[in-house]
Image (tube, grey):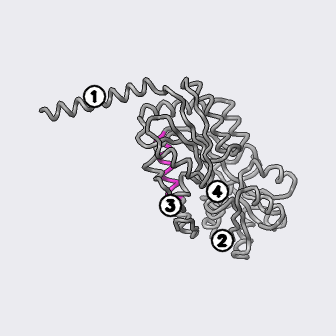
Amino acid sequence: MHKSITCSLLAATLVASTAALAQAWPAKPIRFIVPFPPGGTTDIQARMINERLGAKLGQPVVLDNRGGANGAIGMEIVARAPADGYTMIISTVGTWTVAPHLSKLPYDVQTDFAPLIHMATTPGVLLVHPSVPAKNVKELITLAKTRPGELTYGSSGIGGFGQMCAELFAVTANIKMTHVPYKGSAPSLIDLMGGHIQILFNSALPTMPHIKSGKMRALATTGAKRMSILPELPTVAEAGLKGYENSTWSALGMAARTPQPVIERLNKEINAILQLPEVQEAARADGSMITGGTPEQFREILKSELAKFGRLIKQAGIKGDAG
């Protein structure tokens, strides 16, 4: 009897303290970690949110760029932060779902974080040098099959979006290409224009001037739907490689065990911000599509994408420092 009363009192105390936290929160500025240097896509997307979110919450949401180790430095800061609702992070598909298969990380993305919201999805573009005698996806696959391993593709580095797109393309089409990794996407673009590599999967925005000038040829986009900024280009799946889809994405999380009322409030406010016309337009101009949704939906995406890239990395034999 006494045990039952004690348990009931503890439960009531916990509910009361959680409710009190929800009412009092936020009582100070919120730290918003961007695990990459200023100026990149993730940083730009964070800036779409932080001031608007701060206005809704009545407390500043302060950006803190903590670049390094492909996002792992910023992720560890949040994983080790107090679960009090005052530290959150925005990061990319690579950091959330690819890096865990390639690196020995000081955190677990599924157990050390509370999913907050899936923010936006950004397809890439399949590009070739003009000297490549393939005018569409089917012709490129045929060419690669007649010259196994001879066609080279560039990427921003091991485990980067470009490599994941290319290896998924190769596995789905049953072809062989040779990977040439670079330290960033800009050098790979330069070498594609120079003809030093023949194929590149890259984000749309920095490539559009070069597509228009004829320095590279765009064959298709990598997403499930056509891109609004390149509506004339088919998706890879539309162009003949059925089942192919790969996009980079961004999503927000907090430390595991962050109180549920805080998660729910932030999710609600950020979803509302993402539906603002000016935010939608800014995303479209960057080639992105706003997603939003619930924390549970982000958790399912995280689980699915972890499995997807685990299979791909194994099939393609990609090795990182954990391999």
Which residue is found at the position 63% from the left and 63% from the top? 158
Which span is picked out in magenta? 295-308
Q: Is mark 1 on a helix, strand or loop?
A: helix
Residue type (three-letter) at the residue carrying disc 4 = Phe
Q: What element carries label 3?
A: loop
Q: In which quarter of the image is the N terminus?
A: top left
Provide the residue designation for mark 2. 175
Q: How crowded is mark 1: few (under 14 residues within 10 Å), some or many (20 or more)?
A: few
The disc label shown at residue 89, or none: none
Residue type (three-letter) at the residue carrying disc 1 = Ala
Residue 294, position as x, y percentages in the image: 49, 38
Name the main secondary structure of what is drawn in magenta: helix
Residue type (three-letter) at the residue carrying disc 2 = Ile
The disc label shown at residue 104, or none: 3
Work out how far the residue at label 1 is from the one at label 2, CA to CA, in angstroms.
61 Å
Provide the residue designation for mark 1. 12
Which residue is found at the position 77% from the left and 66% from the top? 198
Q: Is residue 281 above or below residue 189?
A: above
Provide the residue designation for mark 4. 161
